Structure formats: C-alpha cells, structure tokens
Image: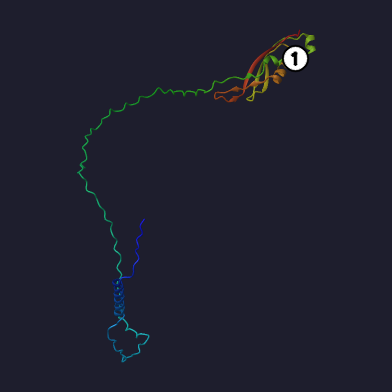
Amino acid sequence: MSYVDQSRGPSPAGIAAVIGVHAAVAALLVTGLTVTGVIPEVRTDWEVRDIPDTPPPLPPEPPADPVEAKPAQPTEPLVHVPQPKFELDTTAPTISSTESIFPPLPTPSPGLGTAVPTPAPQPSFTPVGAKPRNDPAAWFSDNDYRPAWIRKELTGLATFRLEVAANGRVTGCTVTASTGHGELDAATCRLVSKRARFEPARGGTGEAVAGSYTGSVLWRLPD
C-alpha cells in the first residue's frame, strides 16, 4: 500500500487573479451609479385664466325642411317560370264522327182490353194449423164416466171442433157429430176445453194466429 501527500500552500498567482477580479467588479459598480447630465431650469411664469364650468349656449339651428312621407311601393314577388326542355304539341286531335241513324220505333198495337191479374204475394212461411201440446189420450179417462151413465149404459162417438186462440188456449168447442146423448156431448166439450193445451197456428210469415182443431172421443163403459 502507498500513501500520497497532496497538501501544499496557496499560490501567489491565484491570489493576484482574485484581487484583479474584485477590482473590476468595483469599477463597474462605480461607473453604473454615476449620472451625467444637466438639470433643466424650472419655469414659473405661466399665464393663468379662469375657465367657466358651464359652456356658453350654442346658437339655435335653423328648422329642417319637412320631408313628405311617400307610400311604400308594394314589392312584386319574383316568379321564375322554368323553360320546358322540349316543345309540346298542343294541337287538338281531329276525331271523325258519323251521325247514328236509329230505326223508327214500332207503333204499339191496341191491347185486348183485358187487365192482367196481379200475382198474389207468395208466403215466405208455410202456414200450419194448431196442434196439441199434450197427449190427447190424457184428455179423457174412465174416472170421467159417471155412475148414472153406467147404469143407463150411455155410449157413443163424439166428434168435436175446437177454436184455438193465438196464445194456444181453447176459446170454443162445437160437437160436430153427436153420440146421441146430451150428457156425453156436453161432457166432451167441458173436459177437452179444460185439459187440452195447444201450439198456436202459424201464418204466412211465421206469426202466431188463431186456428182450429178437430178431434173425436169414444165413450164406452169402463171394464
């Protein structure tokens, strides 16, 4: 291992250089702070005048000539009509026509003087007569045979005609063929008018109308 001693004293040349730099800086400072020139003389003989705060009024202006108002002229809109690219033929075509001549109408010959009958309107619904709503066999029974009729041995066939209203109720009864016994004929109309129920008759348009019904009953002695 080796050791090198590097310490030594100040150099005279370095000290002289530092002193020269300081002297130059001091000279620059002294030169910069020096002011050269002449101070001008202050003037004190100025002329003083009072100026009023409010200026004097201006002379009046002459009246202006009246201007006559002119009505506004309407401005017409500018219409631009485009020019067609080609010319159109506006000549009307010629259509040839021929007068039509019709043959003369035939003169009607006198009729035979017979009026033609007007056809009757055909019904849209087939009319139907009144029909029983319940069983006609239930209109009579052996219990209707009275003991006095049995003792007299009253029998016979009674034919009757019933008048049926539009509501299906029996409004009248007529014996068209008698049994030969008034008691049996009267009992026939009394019982059938009380017990018979009907569907009313129907007219040409299907509405309920009054009708009739024809039937018969055989009176015989009960067993």
Report the residue at 65% width, 21% height from top.
198
Which quadrant holds residue 191? top right
Examine the rendered structure and indicate whether residue 19 appears above or below residue 164: below
Residue 73 in the image, given as x and y percentages of width and height:
29, 63
Q: Nearer the viewer, residue 220 or 89?
A: 89
User: Is residue 164 rendered to the left or right of residue 109?
Assistant: right
User: Farthest residue in the top direction?
Assistant: 223
Amino acid on which the number 1 mark rests in the picture: Glu
Q: Nearer the viewer, residue 94 or 54?
A: 54
Examine the rendered structure and indicate whether residue 58 appears above or below residue 127: below
User: Farthest residue in the front direction?
Assistant: 1
Report the residue at 75% width, 14% height from top.
183
Residue 62 in the image, given as x and y percentages of width and height:
30, 81
Q: Which residue carries the number 1 mark?
A: 183
Residue 134 in the image, given as x and y percentages of width and height:
67, 18
Location of the N terminus (image quadrant): bottom left
Examine the rendered structure and indicate whether residue 145 appears above or below residue 97: above
